[in-house]
Image (spheres, rainbow, N blue to C red):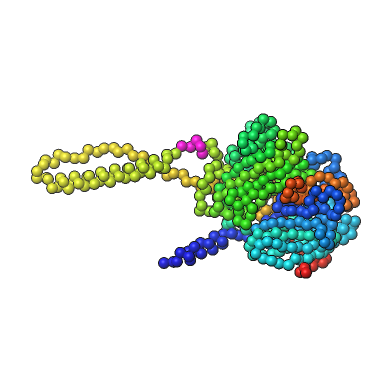
Amino acid sequence: MIPLAWLVGALALAHAAMAVSTPFYLDSFTPQLEYKPDSTNTTGQGPSWNASFTGITWAQREDKRGGKIGVGDGYHWVRGVADGGPSVSITFYGTGAEFFGFWGYLDTGSVSDGEGGVGTGAVRMSLSGGPDSLQDIATSGTSSGVGRPVSLGKYADLSRGTYTVTMRPTDGIVSFTHLVVQTDVGGSASDLTQAIANPSIYKPYIVNGDNSLGLNPKFGQFLGPPGGGALESPSGSWAGQSSDDNKRVGSRVAQESVKINLGVGNSFLGVNGTVNTNHGMFRVDIEPAPTGRQGTQDFWASTSWQVLDTILFATGLDPDTEYSLTLTNIQGQNGQPDDYNVWFDITSLTLWKVPTNVKAKAPNIIGEDPQQKKSSSSVPIGAIVGGVVGGVAVIAALALAAWFLFLRKKRTDDLFESTAYLEPETYTTTPYIVPSSPSAATFSENQPMIYHGQPISPIRARHQSPSESSDGYPLSLTDGSGRGTVGLAGLGFLGPTQQPGHWVATDAGPFHGTTPAGEMPPTYNPAWEPTDESDSNAASRTGGRMTKGR
């Protein structure tokens, strides 16, 4: 017999083998990033992170506050400081993180030093938390012309754990475009390949016959504030919205939330939404908390640009665990008509579905129709079991009685005339009905998306066509000219630029405190793939040396 300890160990190894290290591509505006100094640094003392776009300048943006959509590829740039200068950090669960960008100022797509010369820059990377303790890493280099981002620095092949990686520009100018986090998601490699190429996408709205938008009951429970807060204003509660060719569901009341039962069989979760100048803080609650990650986190969706369909939050999941997700509008309107940062919008929710033997227990899993489920009648399991047991007992009794009568007849044949017989009777029993077991939802509305080999990123292909089904799901997804984004950065306008002809916003990313700091433009260009020095499409560059810090 196999010892129990061996069996438990084998099962644990088998489960661990189902966790696959997967690269997540996140641009410089993801809420998981923390920029320092934050946007409260309005004194002009020292350099601050600046959010910019290759397709629009701040001079063009200034003519209308809150109404301009970021165009082109977004990035954050800053002038380096030798000691105590600006930094950007991310906390993640996984085995590595790598920052990408340009040595120099990206401007509207051509890298330089801001004055037409060759761009130069340097950074220092540091690692904290997790089981590994490593020295700082210093990197530097030069860039010029038009090309793909280069690696600014990385930590790789770490022991699995929860780490914080920080990048500090120390010299020249650094334009930070995106990062790659090597993290764990559940499922086998082959299952993940299929799930990534064919994600399950759910819309929080339905399109009515008159083209107005309503709340999708298959998405989740849209809830008012705790305690039954009044929602008299039509614009003050959850409602469908459509503008700038973008459909979404939004709330402008503090503490309104939507609860979503994710079920099981999910290896990845992504939440898309809108950010703008009138958006505020929102909360993400995942129960139970994914391995190595926080269950509750607050983020800012306030930005000086209008950015549609951005990735607000993303995380890996365990397919064998059943999760519930609650999204809450933390800021919202608190009774004052001039409240500004009040909105929280949701555009879609994305799951990577992989096989699992675990059955979901919660009702109304996302994608299921709660009304249809409620109206469908079924016989209680107790009645089914009782009927089946009773029927079997009756049949057994009849069989015994028939056998007894047969023997009795054989023994008394010489005493009694053979006139006794068993009258046939009909015994009505409750028919056996297979009960429907709770299980992972099946989705007929799923639509495949173009896969560029990047598990999660601001993907250009993540634009739906204008045509949508009555349930609010896209009928097709095409590779349009737009791009999705992820992120968060600065708030407010600080005047003219530090570069000729280009205006910027001091930007600080997600400030984890009481002061908002946010900026989320569309950013990552799928053509920006890591490349070697011989790639003719790469920006010309020299240096790029990597040395261990002292």
Q: Is residue 312 above or below residue 82?
A: above
Q: Quarter-wise, where is residue 328 in the image?
A: top right
Q: Position of residue 152 (x, y in %)?
A: 77, 61
Residue 37 in the magenta stretch? The answer is no
Left-right relation of 537 to 410: right
Percent of width and height locating residue 10 = 51, 64
Of residue 249 and residue 290, the one placed in the foreground of this image is 290
Which quarter of the rendered picture does the C terminus lie within? bottom right
Q: Position of residue 68 (x, y in %)?
A: 80, 42
* Residue placed most toward the observer, 257 or 477: 257
> What residue do we see at 60% from left, 53% from top?
290
Q: Quadrant of the N terminus?
A: bottom left
In percent of width and height, residue 25 lies at 70, 55
Q: Residue at x 78, y 54 (%)?
A: 36
Q: Report the front residue among 262 and 4.
A: 4
295 over 122 or under it: above or below: above
Q: Residue at x 46, y 44 (%)?
A: 436
> Is 18 positioned to the left or the right of 273 in the image?
left
Quadrant assignment, res 228:
top right
| Magenta segment includes 374 | yes
Q: How many marks?
A: 0
Left or right side of 230 for 174:
right
Q: Residue at x 79, y 44 (%)?
A: 304
Looking at the rendering, which quadrant does residue 84 occupy? Answer: bottom right
Helix, strand or loop for the magenta stretch, by majority: helix
| Magenta-highlighted residues | 373-377
Camera-side residue of 337 and 142: 337
Q: Is residue 44 visible?
A: yes
> Can residue 199 be seen by looking at this rendering?
no
